[in-house]
Amino acid sequence: MENKNQKTMSLATKMGISLVCGLVAGFICMFLRESLNSSGNGEAWKLINNILFQDITAEGAASALGVFYIIGQLFIKSLQLVIVPMVFTSIALAIGQISDTRTLGRISFKTIGWFLLCSFFALVLACLVGIMCYNMGIFTAQVEGLSGAAGSTGANPLNVVLNVVPANITQAFGNNTAVLSIVFLAVAVGLCINTLGEEKTATLKKLIVEVNDVVVVFLNYVVTKFGPFAIFVLLTRTFASYGINYLKPALAYVVVTTILLFVFLLVGYPLVIAIGAKLNPMIFIKKITNVAVFGFSTSSSAATLPLNQKTCTEGFGVDNTIASFVLPLGMTINMNGTAIMQVIATVFIAGCAGYEVTLPQLIVVALLALIASAGTPAAPGAGAVILFTILSGVGFVNDGALLAYALILAINRPIEMLVTSLNVVGDAVTSICVAKSEGLLDETKYNA
C-alpha cells in the first residue's frame, strides 16, 4: 500500500510540475508572438508556429509540422479511443452487481440529488455575480474585427431528453458524443443482467469484466507514462495560440468567469465535503489536485474519467460500485462548471449586444444552462458551442450578440480548461457524498 501511495503522489507531482512548466512556456510563447508580430518579424513567428503549434488539419497547413499539435492530439485520441467501452462496461457492471432494486433506486436518487444540489448552488452564484456585473456596466465590451458566428444554429434543449434513447445501437457505440445514449444502454444491460440472474448471463458478464479490465490497464499505462509530458505540450500550445488582442475585448468576461470558477472549485466543493460528507476538506483538496490538473490540461471530462475513478477508489476509499456508477454518469450530465460559464457568457453577450436582462430572463437562462450543460459532450470546446442554444432560447441573436458570441468562441479555450476541472471535481464530490451516505466509503483510505 505504501508503494502504491508513493506512486500516486509521484504522478501528482509530475502533473503539477508539467502544469507549471506548461503555463510558463505558454505565456513566454504568447509574449514572443506579440513581440515578433509588433516588431515586423511576423514571418519568424509564422515559422515557429508552423513547426510547433499549427493545427495540421486546418486549411492551408499542408506544409506545417505542428509537432506539439500532433503529440497532443495523439494523447487525446488514445484516451477518447476507450471512452465508450469504459462508460458502458463500468456502469453495466456497477448496476449488475447491485441485485437489490431498492438499493439501486436509492443510490440513483442520491446521485441525481447531489448533482442537482451542486448545480443549484453553482447557478445561483453565477446568476448573482452575472447580474451584478451587468448592472455595474462591466459587460459592455466593444467587439470589433470579428465576423458573426455564421453557421451556428440554436436547438431546443429538450432534445437532450429525446436523444437519451438511441434509434440505432451501432451509431451509439460509434459516436463519442453520444455518451448519454451509452449510459442508457449500460443501465438497461445492467438491469437485464440482474433480472436474468447469474446462470443465464455468466458469459456476458465475464466478457464485460474482461473488456473493462483491458480498458483500465490501457488507460493506466497511457496516463502514467505519457500524461505529464502531454500536459506540458497541451498547455504550451493552448496559450501560445492566443494573441493579446483577442483577449482584451473579453477581459471582463475572462476575469469574472475565472474568479467565479476558482471560488466554486476551492470554496464551494470543499464546503460540500465538510458539511455534506462530514469529512476533512483539506485532505480532499490535496488528493483531488492531480485530477483537477489533468482535467485542466486535457479540457475533456471524458479523458479525465479514468484518473478520476482511480483517485476516488484508491485515494478517497469510495467503493468501486459507487464510483463506477456515479463518475461516468456525472461525466455525462453533471456539468457545474459548464453551467456557470454559460450563464456568465450569456449575460456578457447580452451586455455587449445592448439587451436588457431581467430576473425572469435570468431564471430562464439558468434553467436552459442546466439542461444544455447536461447535454454537452465531454469534449474540448463543446460548452461554448452549446452556448448558442441558450442565446436562441432567450432571443439574444442580433448582430452584436453574434459578434460577442464569435469572440467567446475565439478565446474560450482557457476558460473551458478551468470549466473541465470544475466538472470532474464535482463528480468526485458526489461519489464521496453518496458513498459516505451508503456506508461504502473507507475513511481510513480517505484520511491516509
Image (cartoon, rainbow, N blue to C red):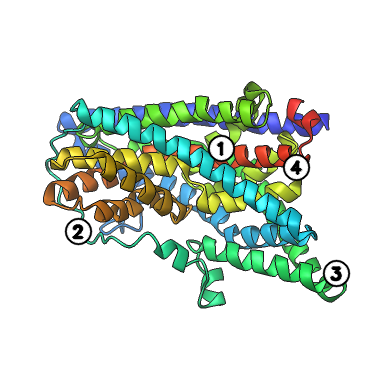
Disc number for residue 242: none
Quarter assignment of residue 236 = top left
Which residue is nearer to you in this view: 405 or 154?
A: 154
Q: Quadrant of the N terminus?
A: top right
Q: Which percent across, then down, holds residue 71?
A: 48, 48
Report crowding for label 2: few under 14, some 14 to 19, many 20 or more residues within 10 A (C-alpha). Answer: few
Residue under numbered circle 2: 150
Lower sequence index among marks 4 and 3: 3
Residue under numbered circle 1: 425
Q: Quadrant of the C terminus?
A: top right
Label 4 – label 2 distance at C-alpha:
50 Å
Question: At x 61% / y 41%, what residue is drawn?
Answer: 430
Residue under numbered circle 3: 198
Q: Secondary structure at mark 3?
A: helix
Label 2 – label 1 distance at C-alpha:
34 Å
* Label 4 vs label 2, nearer the camera: 4
